[in-house]
Amino acid sequence: MTSYEELFENNKKWIQKKTGTDADFFKELAGNQNPDYLYIGCSDSRVTAEEMMGLGPGEAFVHRNIANLVNNVDLNVMSVINYAIKNLGVKHIIVCGHYNCGGVKAALQPKDMGILNPWLRGIRDVYRLHQAELNAITDEHKRYDRLVELNVYEQCVNVIKTAVLQLAYMRSGYPIVHGWVFDIRSGRIVDLNIDFENILKNIKDIYNLTGEQ
Ligand code: CO
């Protein structure tokens, strides 16, 4: 384990490393941010955002919460999505879940989780939407993995339901929404290849917020 004091030592070493290869690194970093990616992932300490994608400072705008949920009355995630699209002009929005997600597992327990109840409800709702498919999976671990994937899918749909995404995409063809699962057992990123265009088209009867028919 890394001790608290070591964090500052590590920070010094990191500064030396960065300025060693590029003397102006922090000067440039202080200038502005212009990331192409918005990453929405789980708070789980084992699932790093930038590190697993090989991205450095300035390359990804990041939001993390328990079980990577995009709840439409969560001012936090909604502000992040709005800012990333309107002000930063990100080209890609990645919703990334992960197998062995404690949040998803907790949602499957028939227990009172206190303040987590309303939060985990988002996952129970995903289960209800896909109940037939999930209940048909007899292997408990496979069912849990599938719920992780379906949760990512539904959170992508939640991003696509927002006016800010729909309007930006209509005007510029960006951003594009992607659903990923980080396979914590191998380190591999699995692209669920969600059909972004089709989801956008199919939800328009109900969720169109662009003012266009
Ligand atoms: Co998690």
Image: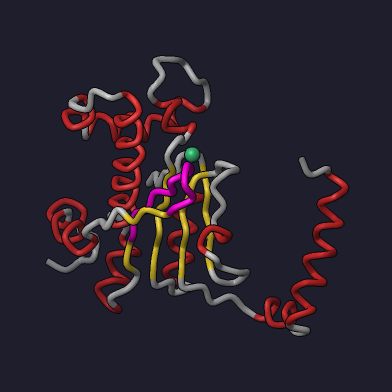
Q: Main secondary structure of the magenta part?
A: strand
Question: Residue 19: image x %, image y %?
Answer: 78, 78
- Span of residues in magenta: 178-188
Residue 64 lies left or right of residue 1; in this view the side is left
* In the image, farthest residue toward the front: 186
Q: Quadrant of the N terminus?
A: top right
Residue 93 lies left or right of residue 133; in this view the side is right
Residue 109, picture quadrant: top left
Question: Residue 169: image x %, image y %?
Answer: 28, 71
Question: Residue 84: image x %, image y %?
Answer: 47, 66
Residue 203 lies left or right of residue 31; in this view the side is left
Residue 190, above or below 61: above
- Residue drawn at 60 percent across, 69 percent down: 56
* In the image, farthest residue toward the top: 111
Question: Residue 190: image x %, image y %?
Answer: 36, 53
Residue closer to the observer: 181 or 87: 181
Let me know if residue 168 is in the magenta part.
no
- Residue drawn at 56 percent across, 61 percent down: 50
Residue 67, picture quadrant: top left
Q: Tell how many labels.
A: 0
Q: Quadrant of the C terminus?
A: bottom left
Residue closer to the observer: 139 or 110: 139
Residue 146, above or below 191: above
- Residue drawn at 69 percent across, 82 percent down: 28
Let me know if residue 182 is in the magenta part.
yes
